């Protein structure tokens, strides 16, 4: 049986995998859909952690701080509508796609959220 900590570690690892995929994209026409897909994955995993994982069942106290960062991210950043609006008009505009990618990465790095995820994975 998988422990609660192992389950959390797997979810956090998937967030990092999608984040790293975003960082590695070399932006070319058509990459907006890949960026959108990875962003939606990240948002889904963050929502699972923020809404479904009880910080009191995780033995490491750092999760409570990370959960607060997740909630801040979910309340502050909305890229889905921007991408949906942008896609039909500018999906082949490399500069606009690159800027969207950078804004998403910047949002994920806000309040050192990605760093906190990496630290917590090491501790789990």
Image (cartoon, rainbow, N blue to C red):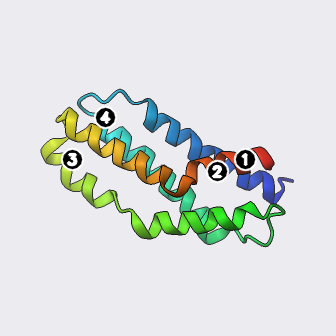
Cα distance, mark 4 to mark 1?
29 Å
Q: Which residue is mark 4?
A: 31
Farthest right residue?
A: 1
* Residue 70 image-quadrant placement: bottom right
- In the rendered structure, which disc, 4 or 1, sits on the residue that comes first in sequence? 4
First in sequence: mark 3 vs mark 4 = 4
Real-space CA distance between mark 1 and mark 3, rounded to the nearest whole angstrom: 34 Å
Judge the density around disc 2: few (<14), some (14-19), many (≥20) Cα neighbours within 10 Å: many
Cβ–Cβ below 8 Å for labels 2 and 1? yes
Disc 4 versus disc 2: nearer the observer: 2
Say which of marks 1 and 3 sits in front. 1
Q: Secondary structure at mark 2?
A: helix
Residue on which the image places disc 3: 87
Q: Look at 78% across and 64% down and name the residue there.
A: 61
Q: CA distance from mark 4 to mark 2?
A: 26 Å
Measure how far apart labels 3 and 4 are at the Cα level. 10 Å
Q: Give the mark nearer the N terminus: 1 vs 3.
A: 3
> What residue is at 47 percent from the left and 66 percent from the top?
74
- Which residue appears farthest toward the front when viewing the image? 111
From what the image shows, is residue 40 above or below residue 64?
above
Disc sitting over residue 40 in the figure: none
Report the mark closest to the observer, 2 or 3: 2
Q: Residue at x 66, y 45 (%)?
A: 118
- Are circles 4 and 2 on residues that touch, CB within 8 Å? no
Q: Position of residue 105 (x, y in %)?
A: 42, 45
- Residue under label 2, please give it: 117
- Write down the residue under mark 1: 121
91 displayed left or right of 50: left
């Amino acid at each position: 049986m998988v422990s609660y900590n192992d389950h959390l570690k797997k979810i956090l690892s998937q967030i990092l995998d999608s984040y790293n995929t975003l960082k590695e994209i070399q932006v070319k026409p058509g990459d907006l859909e890949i960026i959108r897909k990875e962003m939606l994955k990240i948002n889904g995993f963050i929502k699972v952690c923020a809404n479904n994982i009880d910080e009191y069942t995780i033995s490491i106290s750092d999760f409570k701080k990370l959960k607060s960062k997740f909630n801040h991210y979910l309340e502050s950043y909305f890229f889905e509508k921007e991408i949906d609006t942008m896609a039909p008009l500018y999906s082949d505009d490399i500069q606009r796609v690159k800027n969207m990618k950078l804004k998403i990465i910047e949002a994920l790095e806000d309040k050192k959220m990605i760093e906190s995820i990496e630290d917590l994975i090491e501790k789990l």
